[in-house]
Amino acid sequence: QVQLVESGGGLVQPGGSLRLSCAASKFTLDYYVIGWFRQAPGKEREGVSCISSSDGSTYYAESVKGRFTISRDYAKNTVYLQMNSLKPEDTAVYYCATPDETGVMCGVYYSDAANMDYWGKGTLVTVSS
């Protein structure tokens, strides 16, 4: 069974940084699109970023462009989300997810939570002074 585990969340002041990790077990991330999503209290889950399997191309929501960076470490079977210049509106539970399909590309389609099949349990990011 596919398992994704997020880590790295916490409390940070506005303007600070955090790096989230999404580690996989029982499957190899290399062949899959991996997306990061977030859900703030009272709001719908939204796509933040994703990274393709084949060419490493990436996608970012407009709200995080220039501040967040997604990357892969193939040796560690892990995808990271580096978050800089954090704002209070970035406060949310962050999830990583993947579709049950290999060789596909990132983009608007996989920024929709409804198109993802496997999810981690999330890690809480709180941006507050």
Image (spheres, rainbow, N blue to C red):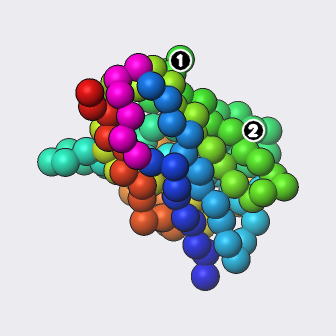
Q: Tell me what residue is drawn at x 75 percent, y 59 percent.
A: 77
Q: Position of residue 124 (x, y in %)?
A: 36, 51
Q: Tell me what residue is drawn at x 45 percent, y 37 percent.
A: 48
Q: CA distance from mark 1 to mark 2?
A: 17 Å
**Circle 2 SS class:** loop
Q: Residues within 10 Å of mark 1 (few under 14, many from 20)?
A: few
Q: Amino acid at mark 1?
A: Gly
Q: Tell me what residue is drawn at x 48 percent, y 64 percent.
A: 120
**Circle 1 SS class:** loop
Query: Residue tagged by mark 1?
Result: 66
Q: Residues within 10 Å of mark 2 (few under 14, many from 20)?
A: some
Question: Is 60 part of what is drawn in magenta?
Answer: no
The span picked out in magenta is: 10-15
Instruction: Point out which mark residue 2 bears.
Output: none
Residue 27 visible here = yes
Q: Seen from this angle, which residue lies furthest right?
A: 75
Q: Indicate left or right for 98 with 47 as reference.
A: right
Quarter of the image where one finds residue 16: top left
Quarter of the image where one finds residue 59: top right
Q: Position of residue 86 (x, y in %)?
A: 40, 26
Q: Seen from this angle, which residue lies furthest left?
A: 42
Q: Position of residue 89 (x, y in %)?
A: 27, 29
Image quarter (top left, top right, bottom left or bottom right) of the N terminus: bottom right
Q: Amino acid at mark 2?
A: Gly
Residue 50 visible here = no
Q: Tell me what residue is drawn at x 32 percent, y 40 percent.
A: 126
Query: Residue tagged by mark 2?
Result: 56
Q: Nearer the viewer, mark 1 or mark 2?
A: 1
Q: Indicate left or right for 102 with 117 as reference.
A: right
